[in-house]
Each structure stands twice: as structure tokens, then as C-alpha cells.
Image (cartoon, helix red, strand yellow):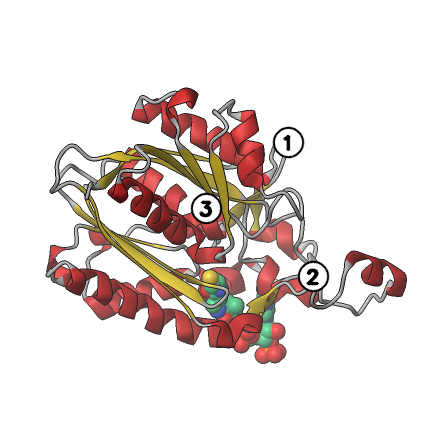
């Protein structure tokens, strides 16, 4: 078995900064409420025509590839995580494969929402471990702003989410002690509808139904979130899956140099930090600037933490996420 490692990281966010005050002009909300409940000060919304899910993924991927020192011809496989694809089908993986000029390699789309990047890393890791692929491009990208209900009706959801993309290049590690030590992924479909976007869907309401009914009270095509239920489940699952990762490797909480939690809500991160007794230097948060960017949040945070020198060679880095599905997971990395 081989070991995979992250050889390059990159992220891209649209230039359009949307503050809490901007949102309060569209809906009944205010800066104080949003900061107190979520920690978010601002988020990005798509600005340019090319700020599509695949387009932003391409920009993040180019940076990650340059830093990894790999070219388009070197990529063996693409794993792309998103809940906001450019098209209903095909998924954004093939659009990115085309736009980056990659060989005709497989492009796999992952639908695991906020845990999408963790799932994607886990899949990429398996292919590298077996020796089937040497270089895998893993991308998480979201354009939430196009699908949110930006009225008071949608305020419980729309103030939280933002647009952005992050990418990582995984390669075979030359050093068996360095790289991804283990990945752990889970789901619980019992709570599928507690954080969901129900339409359009073949099992429920399709676009033609929505257009035909033209019902202003129909909320099936904007995201729904049972916020408090999600919160309660998130803190439990985050804790479980971080512990699972540590135990699998015979490690202790005190071994963690950097925890990168999915940026769901600053209060969730702070709860986990407190529960594990970690210092401010051991947990990275940037939700204040970007909101919750779902599949992009872990790679954006990981890239920023690495760029700012907060992750050094030999560090133990733990990534963890929880989200719609419910899905959750962790990745333990010796950097
Ligand atoms: N601005 C102002 N008021 C708002 C608001 C907003 N953006 N959104 C909701 N409210 C109001 C509600 O209508 C409610 O009013 P009421 O008491 O008059 O009915 C009140 O604030 C409290 O709402 P509630 O939903 O109970 O607030 P909360 O403390 O649970 O905070 C969340 C809401 C969404 C911030 C919180 O539940 C949360 O963060 N959940 C987890 C979300 C998450 O992490 N999701 C991503 C997972 S991947």
C-alpha cells in the first residue's frame, strides 16, 4: 500500500463582498444577530460570469497544481464535491476536466454537501493507496448565492452561506510517515430532509411543476434548514469523528497541532474547541470572512492556514466536517 499526501493547495473566492449590513437591506436581519449566532461578518457572492461552480473550481485547481508542481497531463483522476452544480447534469467534474485541458481521465462528482471535500479526499486517498493513480485533483466549490431565498422568509439560511472554491492535489508520498494517515466517513439518511433542497427532483417536484404552479409560497426550491437540530447533531458528530480519527492512529487530542473544522458556524467550532480543550492556535476559523461555503470550506480554510504559516512539516492536522445528509467525516494528516 502507498500513502497519499497533499502536495498543493489553492482557493478562489469571488471579489463581491456582501456584508451583514448589505443583507439587512434585503431582509429583516441585522449585523449583531448574525455575528452573535454565527460569527459571520461578511461572505462572498458571485461577481463575474465565470464565477460558476466549475469556473471557480478551475481557478482554485490551477493554484493548487502550480504549487504541487504538476501540469494538466499529470492529473490521473478528478474528484469534485459540490451541492450547487453548474447544471443538473452533467456534474461539474467533467466541465473542470475540459476547462483545465486534462487528459480523458475520470471525473467523479461527490454529493455529500458540507462533508463533500472530506468524502472526496477519502476517495482520492483510496485510489492512491492501491497504486491505481499517482496524482488526483480534489476540488470543492459552491455558488450558493444563486439559489438562496434573499427575503425575510429565507433569513435563517441565507445569511449563513457564501460562494467560493478550494482545491488540493494529492500525490503518492515518498515518505511513509508523511501524508494522510486515515479517513473516516459516515452518513445518517434518517435526517435527510432536516437540511435540504427538495426541488427540482425526480422523486418530488420537477421544474415544470414549479413553473406550472407558480406558487409564491412554494419553498421547495430554496434550501431548508432545521437550524437547532442541525446544530445539536453537528457538535456530537464532529466530536465523535475527530475522536475516531485519533483513536485509529493511536493519537491523543494533545497531539493535534491544527484542527480545521468545516466552517458551519463559529459557535460550533468554538464548542468543539472548548470540548477538546484546544487553544486558539490549534483551531483555524475563517467563517467570519466567507460564511459557510459548504464543500469549499475545508479546502479554503486549509489553504489559508497553510499560507499563513500555521501548518508546518511534521504537524498533525485534523480535518473534520458535518452537514446535510446527514453526512460527516474526518481526515488525519501528518503534514
Ligand atoms: N436575522 C434575524 N433573526 C433571525 C434570523 C436572521 N438572519 N434568522 C432567524 N431569526 C430569528 C428567528 O425567526 C427566531 O425568531 P422568533 O424567536 O421570533 O421565532 C429567532 O431568530 C431565533 O431563531 P432560531 O432558529 O431559534 O435561532 P438559533 O439561535 O437556532 O440560530 C442558526 C439559528 C441557524 C444560526 C443556528 O440554529 C445554527 O447555526 N444552526 C446550525 C446551522 C449550521 O451550522 N448549518 C450548517 C451545517 S453544515
The residue indicated by pointer 2 is 201
Closest to the camera, between mark 3 and mark 2, is 2
* Residue at image coords 29%, 41%: 305
| Res 139 → quadrant | top left
| Camera-side residue of 116 and 258 | 116
Residue at left offset 54%, top offset 49%: 162
Closer to the eye: label 3 or 1: 3
Q: Is residue 168 visible from the viewing direction of this image?
A: yes
**Quarter of the rendering occupied by the C terminus:** top left
- The secondary structure type at the circle numbered 1 is loop
Report the residue at 58% width, 34% height from top: 95
Q: Which mark is residue 48?
A: 1
Residue 230 location (% of width, % of height): 47, 72
Horizontally, residue 63 falls left or right of residue 44, namely left
Q: Is mark 3 within 8 Å of ligand 1?
A: no
Question: Which circle, 2 or 1, is nearer the viewer?
Answer: 2
Element at label 3: helix
Amino acid at each position: 500500500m502507498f500513502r497519499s499526501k497533499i502536495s498543493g493547495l489553492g482557493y478562489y473566492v469571488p471579489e463581491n463582498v456582501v456584508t451583514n449590513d448589505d443583507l439587512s437591506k434585503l431582509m429583516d436581519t441585522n449585523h449583531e444577530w448574525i455575528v452573535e449566532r454565527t460569527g459571520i461578518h461578511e461572505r462572498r457572492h458571485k461577481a463575474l460570469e465565470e464565477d460558476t461552480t466549475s469556473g471557480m473550481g478551475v481557478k482554485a485547481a490551477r493554484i493548487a497544481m502550480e504549487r504541487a508542481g504538476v501540469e494538466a497531463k499529470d492529473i490521473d483522476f478528478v474528484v469534485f464535491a459540490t451541492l450547487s452544480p453548474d447544471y443538473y447534469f452533467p456534474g461539474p467534474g467533467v466541465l473542470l476536466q475540459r476547462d483545465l485541458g486534462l487528459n480523458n481521465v475520470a471525473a467523479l462528482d461527490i454529493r455529500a454537501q458540507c462533508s463533500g471535500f472530506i468524502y472526496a479526499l477519502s476517495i482520492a486517498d483510496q485510489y492512491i493507496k492501491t497504486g491505481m493513480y499517482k496524482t488526483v485533483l480534489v476540488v470543492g466549490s459552491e455558488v450558493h448565492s444563486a439559489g438562496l431565498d434573499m427575503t425575510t422568509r429565507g433569513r435563517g439560511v441565507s445569511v449563513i452561506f457564501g460562494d467560493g472554491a478550494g482545491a488540493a492535489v494529492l500525490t503518492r508520498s515518498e515518505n511513509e510517515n508523511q501524508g494522510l494517515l486515515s479517513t473516516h466517513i459516515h452518513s445518517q439518511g434518517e435526517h435527510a430532509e432536516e437540511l435540504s433542497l427538495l426541488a427540482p427532483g425526480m422523486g418530488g417536484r420537477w421544474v415544470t411543476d414549479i413553473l406550472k404552479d407558480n406558487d409564491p409560497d412554494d419553498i421547495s426550491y430554496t434550501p431548508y434548514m432545521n437550524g437547532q437540530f442541525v446544530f445539536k447533531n453537528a457538535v456530537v458528530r464532529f466530536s465523535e469523528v475527530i475522536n475516531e480519527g485519533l483513536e485509529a492512529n493511536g493519537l491523543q487530542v494533545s497531539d493535534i497541532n491544527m484542527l480545521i473544522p468545516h466552517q458551519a458556524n463559529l459557535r460550533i467550532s468554538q464548542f468543539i474547541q472548548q470540548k477538546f480543550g484546544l487553544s486558539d492556535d490549534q483551531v483555524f476559523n475563517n467563517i467570519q470572512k466567507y460564511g459557510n461555503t459548504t464543500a469549499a470550506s475545508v479546502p479554503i480554510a486549509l489553504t489559508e492556514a497553510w499560507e499563513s504559516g500555521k501548518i508546518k512539516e511534521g504537524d498533525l492536522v485534523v480535518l473534520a466536517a458535518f452537514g446535510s445528509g446527514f453526512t460527516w467525516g474526518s481526515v488525519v494528516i501528518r503534514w
